[in-house]
Amino acid sequence: MKILDISGITKTYGRNGSAVKALDGISFSVDKGSFTAVMGRSGSGKTTLFNIISGLDKPDSGQVILDGDDLCLMNDTKLTELRRRKVGYIFQFFNLIPEFTVYQNICLPSYLDRTKPDEDF
């Protein structure tokens, strides 16, 4: 069963002479329970890809299906719920709340979703 299905994703930053194609027709899928690595040199589009997979950014074209949901059709509220419930994302520069412990930072999405954190992790 596929947990992620990416089809024809493109993303360009800038316009005209300063346009940079970060992603150009990327397609792949990931099976549920599998491990996948994304590797490449600096500037190759890894962060852009992850921002699109997590719903933090939208592609210019293509489709992203995550656990049966088409992210390209979701509004900001639905994308926020999806990130809170289905996506674990650690930013390059962490973006943690310094007043919170590590545990509190990890549990923050559960608190915001008014659910009990899974104690079995």
Image: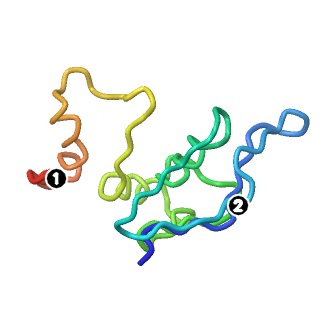
Q: Position of residue 97 (x, y in %)?
A: 27, 26
Q: Nearer the viewer, residue 93 or 80?
A: 93
Is 41 situated above or below 119? above
- Which of the numbered marks, if any, corresponds to residue 96? none
Is 94 situated above or below 78? above
Q: Position of residue 11 (x, y in %)?
A: 70, 50
Mark 2, secondary structure of its residue: strand
Q: Counting residues from the N terminus, which is met first, the one under dot 2 or under dot 1? A: 2
* Residue reaching furthest to the top: 98
Contact, CB < 8 Å: mark 2 with mark 1?
no
Q: Say left or right for 86 vs 72.
A: left
Amino acid at circle 1 = Arg
Q: Quadrant of residue 100?
A: top left
Residue at figure coordinates x 54%, y 49% from the top left: 38
Q: Position of residue 4 (x, y in %)?
A: 48, 66
Q: Say left or right for 82 vs 105.
A: right
Q: How is the image coloured?
A: rainbow
Q: Which residue is labeled 2 in the image?
A: 61
Residue at figure coordinates x 25%, y 21% from the top left: 98
Disc 2/disc 1 C-alpha distance (Å) = 34 Å
* Residue reaching furthest to the bottom: 1
Amino acid at circle 2 = Ser
Residue at figure coordinates x 23%, y 47% from the top left: 112
Quarter of the image for the N terminus: give it.
bottom left
Q: Which residue is labeled 1 in the image?
A: 114
Label 1: how many Cα within 10 Å (few below 14, some 14–19, many 20+): few
Is 44 situated above or below 102? below
Q: Position of residue 81 (x, y in %)?
A: 35, 56
Residue at figure coordinates x 46%, y 66% from the top left: 66
Mark 1, secondary structure of its residue: loop
